[in-house]
Image: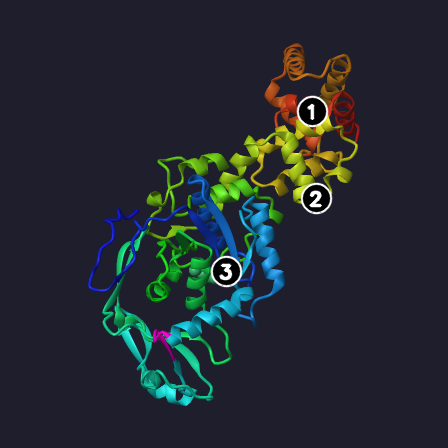
Amino acid sequence: MGHACSGFKKLYGITSSCFMNHPSIRVRFAPSPTGMLHIGGLRTALFNFLFARHHNGKFLVRIEDTDKERSLPVYTQAIINTLTWCSMAPDEPLVIQSERQAEHLRIAQQLVQEGKAYYCYCTPEELQKRIAQTTIEGISYARYDGFCKKFIGQSSDKPRVIRFLVPANCKQVVIEDAIKGQIVFSADTFDDFILVRSDGAPMYNFVVVLDDAFMQISHIIRGEEHLINTPKQLLLYKACGYMVPTFAHLPLILGPDGTKMSKRDAAANAYDYKERGYLPQALCNYLVRLGWSHGDQEIFSVPEMINAFSLNAISSKGALFDTQKLDWVNSMHIKALSADMLYQYMKEVMQLPLGTTVASWSLRTMYLLIDLYKQRCTTLQALYRELVALHSRPSVYEIAELNHEQKQLLESLITILSIQEFTHTNLSHTIKEFCHTQEIKLSDLGPLIRIALTGKKDAPGIYDLMASLGKDETITRLKNYYRR
Ligand code: GLU
């Protein structure tokens, strides 16, 4: 559960605090455009977005494209498309990390001049001797021995990297994480890490701090996999004299087998869920519950999520990704949506050729049928398939053989139906009367009507179906069935 922060504590080392007084709430989502936005990334974006909205703060997006080989514009576009689909557009223009490189390098030089960073000239061969592996609590750390510290104040033309100089008196770094509580990192778990590579490219741990400070980020809400980077970043905040933001590391999303969810576990690409017929509000509702809770409530509208969201209610334990639950949440949102909204989603958002496929239906019929079928579908795709299937008159029937009496029964029914006004109430009344006169059970006639109209045994209620399809279509389908 959320850790109750106890103010700024000085624990023999460097400490972050969740009670730094930030002028306003500003959060950021900082994806690297090296792949599609996956489910975990979308949840991180969502938690930042909800936190910002809850506090009337700002939600910002920074594209971390410093890895030149792997970053591609197509991925940046895909990330933006996914955020736009989920109505999470940033409140300020996108920050593109690579565009700030000159500033990053300027600050690196400044740190060197201030004696807070130094040039390291070690070749890869030399580093093999000067990097030792330490294992602490089962985690292995590679640590450089600081050989080039002796060149501080000197400069040479040899290839070099810039390393951060971990202050000699730093024994540990203490993180007061808003979700995980207090975490102490021994100084043995990090070394004089690289700020700028020999090819002049600044490294993640360095630029992330500069950019978060530049963007005046008050809270860093991100995945737990970045916890390990946080002590280094905290040291840089202190060295640069920046205000330290509050850190909040989100629990992992676990795959069905309880281990860290891999990109293969239905999570490769969050945008795929759009094509697969999930509503963005349903996907976000599902994601918000991955690690966060609000009593027993499962279904949230977006305003409800914003209203209820708090970092305190985020669990520090991993959350299990459950496709069945996602389907259920989606079905609940589909049911709650009006027929015209669902129609728009299917037509425009999913770009399904609904308009042309079922063009002969009036909008009224379409909406009636959507309202009827939305009760039974877990995705927009499924709803779409049902409507398309219903639109074509059945050619295959799940009960194919009719005996003479059944045929006669349907024929007599048609005579009655032709004089009926096709409303649910009228149809219900007439068909019950018809059964009574014919001395048959409704449970014998109902399935025949359902099959005649849809070809299937499993379909919505007959009165609704008949009322939605209308008199002419209903009669045609009944005749087609018994006259084969
Ligand atoms: N760019 C990093 C990533 O995509 C996120 C860094 C951060 O949130 O600090 O994982």
Residue found 60% across the figure and 33% down from its top: 374
Q: Main secondary structure of the magenta part?
A: loop
Tell me: residue 2, above or below residue 419. Answer: below
Position of 35 with respect to 467 (left or right) is: left
Q: In what element is the residue under mark 2?
A: loop
Q: Are marks 3 and 2 in contact (CB under 8 Å)?
A: no
The stretch in magenta equals 114-118
Q: Please state which amino acid type lies under the numbered disc 3.
A: Lys
What residue sits right under mark 3 in the picture?
263
Is residue 229 toward the left or the right of residue 402 in the image? left
Mark 2: amino acid:
Leu
Q: Earlier in the sequence, mark 3 or mark 1?
A: 3
The residue labelled by disc 2 is 352
Residue shown at 59%/53% (left/top)?
80
Residue 46: x and y in percent read 47, 47
**Whole-percent x, y for residue 162 in the image:** 41, 78
* First in residue order: circle 3 vs circle 2: 3
